Image (cartoon, rainbow, N blue to C red):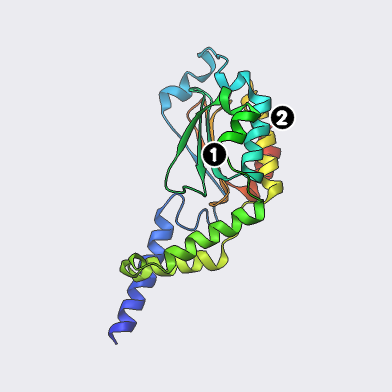
């Protein structure tokens, strides 16, 4: 009787946890393949009167985008953040998954710099490494201390998880310059995460869009000129 009560409670907590988050442990659900979040109203109201400046990223954007796509397809990187205002590029590597590296955009636009900092690994091997990392977590002693509803979430995600595809990565990376070049509501920063299969974008009006990789192409078609 006690086990059934615990299972029932775990099911309720699992549903609540997944419903409460903007992006849950399993990512965006099928009912919300795109989420829009309004930011600071003062930034929205002054968007069209604020002068636009060329950022460090803008100066090297063509070779930089080529190199960032290379990072996601053929190197150790699985998550990248591009900050246009600051010129920062944040990267996460499967070889050190708990840490974040920060690079200057002008340096990361250099192929030799890319070769020095990011080991090559095939796309297929990188995906398998992600699966191995989560399998190791599942088999660890610390995982036994996790509540039952979190074990259920983790196990279901582990069984059904699939990464962002090569085509989706190419579509995303090749569209970034277009979004940055928009005349009014242009891109301020973007995060691409192939593990969570989503893209998070902030625009100069301080609005945020969180989009699943599978829905990204439709977003571009619907919103880009």
Whether residue 48 is situated above or below residue 109 in the rendered picture: above
Q: In which quarter of the image is residue 61?
A: top right
Could you say which disc has been placed on residue 225 in the image? 2
Residue situated in front as seen by the camera: 127 or 25: 127
Q: Which of 172 and 195 is in front in this view?
A: 195
Residue for point 55% across, 36% down: 117
Residue 185: percent from left, percent from top: 58, 25
Q: Which residue is drawn at 51% across and 49% down?
A: 95
**Residue at the extreme left of the image, as rendered:** 2
Q: Is mark 1 on a helix, strand or loop?
A: strand
Question: Where does residue 115 sit, x and y in percent of width and height?
Answer: 62, 35
Mark 1 Cα within 10 Å, few/some/many (few <14, many 20+)?
many
Q: Which residue lies furthest to the front in this view?
A: 116
Residue at 62% across, 48% down: 213
In the picture, which quadrant includes the N terminus?
A: bottom left
- Image-based side of 81 in relation to 98, left or right: right
* Mark 2 or 1: the one toward you: 1
Q: Mark 1 points at which residue?
A: 80
Q: In the depicted view, which residue is nearer to us: 83 or 142?
A: 142
The residue located at (39%, 55%) in the rendering is 20
Give residue 209's position: percent from left, percent from top.
53, 39
Above or below, comparing residue 139 to residue 44 in the picture: below
């Amino acid at each position: 009787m006690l086990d059934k009560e615990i299972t029932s409670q775990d099911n309720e907590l699992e549903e609540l946890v997944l419903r409460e988050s903007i992006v849950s442990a399993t990512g965006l659900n099928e009912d919300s393949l795109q989420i829009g979040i309004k930011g600071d109203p003062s930034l929205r109201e002054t968007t069209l009167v604020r002068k636009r400046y060329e950022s460090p990223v803008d100066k090297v954007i063509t070779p930089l985008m080529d190199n960032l796509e290379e990072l996601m397809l053929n190197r150790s990187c699985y998550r990248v953040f591009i900050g246009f205002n600051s010129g920062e590029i944040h990267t996460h590597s499967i070889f050190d998954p708990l840490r974040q590296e920060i690079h200057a955009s002008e340096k990361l636009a250099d192929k030799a710099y890319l070769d020095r900092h990011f080991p090559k690994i095939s796309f297929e091997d990188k995906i398998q490494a992600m699966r191995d990392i989560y399998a190791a977590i599942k088999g660890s002693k610390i995982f036994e201390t996790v509540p039952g509803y979190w074990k259920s979430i983790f196990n279901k995600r582990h069984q059904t998880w699939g990464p962002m595809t090569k085509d989706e990565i190419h579509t995303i990376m090749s569209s970034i310059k277009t979004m940055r070049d928009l005349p009014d509501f242009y891109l301020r920063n973007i995060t691409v995460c192939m593990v969570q299969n989503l893209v998070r974008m902030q625009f100069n009006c301080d609005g945020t869009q969180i989009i699943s990789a599978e829905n990204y192409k439709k977003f571009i078609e619907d919103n880009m000129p």
